[in-house]
Amino acid sequence: MRYLILSDIHANVDALKAVLDHARGEWDSIVCCGDIVGYGPDPNAATEWTAANAAVVVRGNHDKGAVGLADLEDFSPNARAACLWTASVLTPGNVSWLRSLPRGPLDHAEFQIAHGSPADEDEYVMSLVEARPIFQLLKTGLLFFGHTHVQGAWVREERRYFAIQRPRADRERLDIQLQPDGVYLINPGSVGQPRDTDPRAAYAIFDSNSKVVQLRRCAYDHFAVLEKIRRAGLPTILGERLAVGR
Ligand code: ZN
């Protein structure tokens, strides 16, 4: 089985379309690690596409924030403004679908998924030091998570712990061959708002037969999204940051 692993789409349908073109014919099932909405200009289209296409989804903090399930005092001013705008445009059907999303972690036969960490859906796992306690919590040797918008992996193989970074700026993919006794915490990166200094949309593909996870990047027209963000009246910084991946 080949899984298309998406996270942090953030209502950026232009980036999502680019990812789907880039990965065409290379997956059988779709997994989403949350934050379908928030920040971007197309929350209804992103929600409807995910509801129709993703086989497994967990909620993210922005999915909660846009439908009254999170305290917006915990959000930065721009994130809060985006949540309020998103709430004002979401259709009732999309609100109820987002409200019904499960809290992570979710167990799948071949992996687990979470938005932040398996211990706390809102936790940012930013370093190997923060990742180390999570290795003990996993039921399988593989976790896909999001939330940080930073693509990469934390790995335990035998007694060694190490990090794997996103693909180089001049490459579109980086393959991780999973070892039978290894444990892997893998962040596919953010489709709609990368924050790892690479503005290209990020995602991953996991082939459970060959046990390879590919970290992938694909370019898209982020200026078109900036224009939509301007027209929507969202804070323009949310479009400008797409050009620098921060
Ligand atoms: Zn996010």
Image: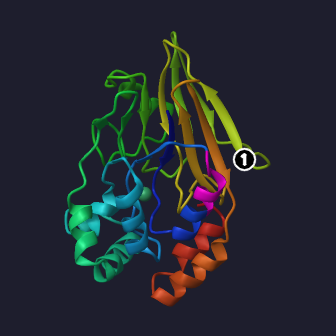
Disc 1 target residue: 172
The three-letter code of the residue at mark 1 reads: Glu
Q: Is residue 4 visible?
A: yes
Q: Is residue 223 left or right of residue 17?
A: right
Occupied quadrant, residue 200: bottom right
What's the residue at 51%, 81% (across, down)?
A: 229
Q: Position of residue 245 (x, y in %)?
A: 62, 60
For label 1, count other residues whose C-alpha is less than 10 Å away and answer few (under 14), some (14-19) or many (20+): some
Q: Is mark 1 within 8 Å of ligand 1?
A: no
Tell me the chief SS of the magenta region.
Answer: helix
User: Is 206 a magenta residue?
Assistant: no
Q: Is residue 37 visible?
A: no
Q: Ligand 1 is found in which quarter of the picture?
A: bottom left
What's the residue at 42%, 32% (across, down)?
A: 143
What's the residue at 31%, 49% (across, down)?
A: 58
Identify the magenta region: 18-25
Q: Position of residue 78 (x, y in %)?
A: 42, 74
Q: Is residue 3 left or right of residue 20?
A: left
